[in-house]
Amino acid sequence: MPPSFEIKPIGFVRRSDDTLWIEIDASFLPAMAGLEDFSHIQVLFWFDQNDHAEGRSVLKVHPCRNEQNPLTGVFATHSPLRPNLIGSSLCRIASIDANRIYIDRIDAFDATPVIDIKCFIPTSRDLTNLRLPDWA
Amino acid sequence: MPPSFEIKPIGFVRRSDDTLWIEIDASFLPAMAGLEDFSHIQVLFWFDQNDHAEGRSVLKVHPCRNEQNPLTGVFATHSPLRPNLIGSSLCRIASIDANRIYIDRIDAFDATPVIDIKCFIPTSRDLTNLRLPDWA
């Protein structure tokens, strides 16, 4: 059991004035085959701007950076400060052109490293009696 | 821009005959504060059994290991073979006891390293005109 695992970017978030896309590294082009059959993807990315000891040691935050929200453990939030700096966004595919996946929106800055793409399949899990706190 | 990022387990999947839980490393106990207000969590884990050069170089698979499904890029699947070996499951919380989160089910073996927990908040994204291929 290794004490840590290595992840490498598979691409990057790219933004211009009016366009937003994920630029997949050309070496991974074959891994995109079939994405065109899906309307949505889950994009996992790395909060690289927080990749320092301090950013990874924060265990509690005020959700949405609003001090009126109760101090909450980062696992009970989507905070960009967390032990492993993984972010997740559900994105609608606008179009695909070679190694570019044009999307509607994503909660990440330009040049953010993308670490995985997964097709979005609606959950078969039981979502009845869904419960969440007021701030969410 | 580092060429790779380091992730560390925050806990492990644990299974006994009739019980299933995530055992969070005690050092991360504060990061769990507030989880009790949510009914569901997204659990990210590491497909450690595939953590070798071969497992990470597979770019196309037959989804669900069914050869009748068309050969598909791993980013258009949830395959446990992929460049970064991240798995994702949506789980219902059964109960929480100190650093143990008891859950209903997860698509991971006993002793699988858990790398992140995120509270589940239903998406505000537009999911109309959802599109996916027959195999999904």
Image: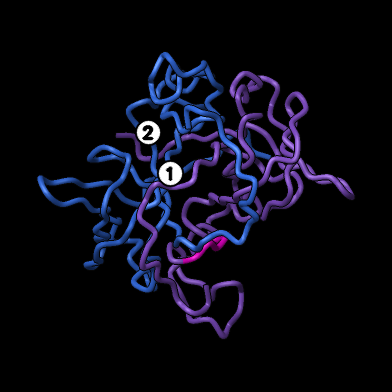
Chain colours: A blue, B purple
Q: Looking at this view, name the residue that lies furthest to the bottom.
A: B68
Rendered position, B115 above or below A62: below
Q: Position of residue A105 (x, y in %)?
A: 27, 48
The residue under label 1 is which amino acid type? Ser
In the rendering, which numbered label is found on residue A88? 1
Q: Quick one: SS at disc 1?
A: strand
Residue at the image position 39 percent from the left and 38 percent from the top? A46
Q: Position of residue B15 (x, y in %)?
A: 81, 46
In the rendering, which numbered label is found on residue A47? 2
Depth check: give the residue in front, A6 or A59.
A59
Q: Position of residue A99 (x, y in %)?
A: 26, 63
Q: Position of residue B118 (x, y in %)?
A: 54, 37
Rendered position, A98 above or below A21: below
Depth check: give the residue in front, A109 or B118.
B118
- Residue range in magenta is B77-81
Label 1, residues with CA under 10 Å away: few <14, some 14-19, many ≥20: some
